[in-house]
Amino acid sequence: MAQQKIWFVTGASRGFGRIWTEAALKRGDKVAAAARDASALKDLVATYGDSVVALSLDVTDRDAVFEAVKQAHRQFGRLDVILCNAGYGYMGALEEAVTADAHANFETNVFGTLSVIQAALPLLRAQGSGHILTVSSIGGVIGFPTGGIYVATKFAVEGLSEALAGEVAGFGIKVTILEPGSFTTGFRSSIMAAPAMSEYEVVRQAVLGSFKPEMSGNPAATAAAILNVVDANEPPLRLLLGTGPLPMIKKLYEKRLSTWEQWAEVSNAAQGSRAA
């Protein structure tokens, strides 16, 4: 049996965050579960008692993030798993995007994640261990029309997480980027849509039509994968969740490599000659 772990989870009240929080508690781990409305976690507190502390937290409030992480550390004495799950989707063609709403999506998905990481790192460095998991998406690897702002936030999460992994490896801290495909988590209920322009309706419907119900996985089945990763001595930098992403990514990278190779002569010429 794996050693008991102490988790700090954002976005713990529903979707993946709720499922992964419950999975950790069910196996005997302890969790500082953070959500915008901590009352949504009352049943977990009633069931698991002192093994869970429910925290009200908006990850866009940087000071509150630091205080919540400190409170969790004071409560449990250490933190082993930092799971940056809070986030939502802002959808629409780029021409449709409202700047303030685009900023807000980045504030939650990217800067909220950054704040949690920065709050946890001094504690993890001091203890010489820890595992940071960031939640990306298939949309963090593949961009799709009418999702430009959302996928940009997830591309950003991928980039900062990959940089982080190289920065903290020497401190005994692991990093894993979670990349779910389509799951029936209720994520669509948390999607915010930009004002629609009729000019983009054809492409919008084409994108919506490409997501078939049978492609969506059972989110409960992801719990075992997450526990497997946090228990691994050498966890992966990236973990796809579901059967859909890998075939799509293989096609994407084959196309990218082909394009780069086709244009290699132009690319190489751009190197120029070294100045004398």
Image (cartoon, rainbow, N blue to C red):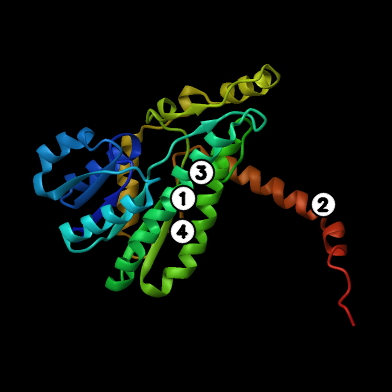
How packed is label 4: few (under 14 Cα within 10 Å), some, or many (20 or more)? some
Whole-number angstrom distance, CA of label 4 to CA of label 3: 22 Å
Q: Position of residue 137 (x, y in %)?
A: 49, 42
Residue 74 in view of the camera? yes
Q: Which mark is residue 106?
A: 3
Looking at the image, residue 137 lies above or below residue 74? above
Q: Is residue 181 left or right of residue 265?
A: left
Residue 136 in view of the camera? no
Q: Which mark is residue 237?
A: 4
How packed is label 1: few (under 14 Cα within 10 Å), some, or many (20 or more)? many
Q: Position of residue 19 (x, y in %)?
A: 28, 38
Name the N-terminal-most of marks 4 and 3. 3
How packed is label 3: few (under 14 Cα within 10 Å), some, or many (20 or more)? many
Read off the residue under disc 1.
111
Tell me the amino acid under the disc marked 3.
Phe
Quadrant into which the C terminus falls: bottom right
Whole-number angstrom distance, CA of label 1 to CA of label 2: 37 Å
